[in-house]
Image: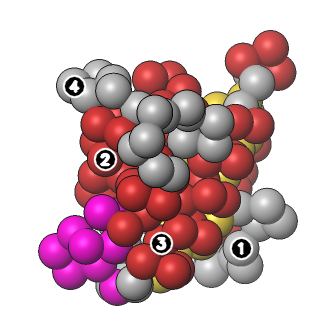
Amino acid sequence: MGFTEIFVSTHEDALKRAGALESGGPAAPGAVRIPDISDFEVERLGDLAGVAVHAPGADYELAMVDVASDSLLGVPAAMVRTLAELLSYETEGEGDVLEDVAVNWAAEEDMPFGPDEARAYVRRIAELAAAVDPATRSGLYVWTS
């Protein structure tokens, strides 16, 4: 299995980035590159985050954004909001939701990393989601090899 890269970009720049990745390009500055997972595991992260912030059942399914690349997927707005909420979600005695999501994500079947790596990945992905600015027409994208 290859890797998955998650990044913030405009649609046009995301297509350029997908082309660079398909040609074997290095990780983009600021992107989160995770070896040995697919888009399915990213969708599962969205599901787990949704449960943690009490927003289960929203649209957490990644969608193809352009016929130019079937490896490039867009993260739906509901999932972007949910992931960003992990950074600031307030709970009453429930502990750190980001920590809980990371532990649960690492515990998913066939995950290639443990809770410590998952914690770093989830924090970085949540920070990317928080950086999405609809005013600049940016979005959160997932590219999977």
The residue drawn where x is 20% and y is 80% is: 110
Q: CA distance from mark 4 to mark 3?
A: 23 Å
Q: Considering depth in this image, is 60 or 82 the residue closer to the camera?
A: 82
- Could you tell me how far apart the alpha carbons at marks 2 and 3 are, in whole angstroms? 13 Å
Name the residue type under label 4.
Gly
Residue at 62% over, 58% down: 123
Residue indicated by mark 1: 27
Looking at the rendered structure, the kind of residue marked 2 is Leu
Give the farthest residue toward the top. Answer: 135
Task: State the image quarter where residue 57 is shown.
Answer: top left
Choose between 3 and 121: the one closer to the eye: 121
Residue stretch rendered in magenta on the structure: 104-112
| Callouts 1 and 4 close, C-beta under 8 Å | no
Q: Residues within 10 Å of mark 1 (few under 14, many from 20)?
A: some
Amino acid type of the residue tagged 3 in the rendering: Ala
> Which residue position holds label 4?
57
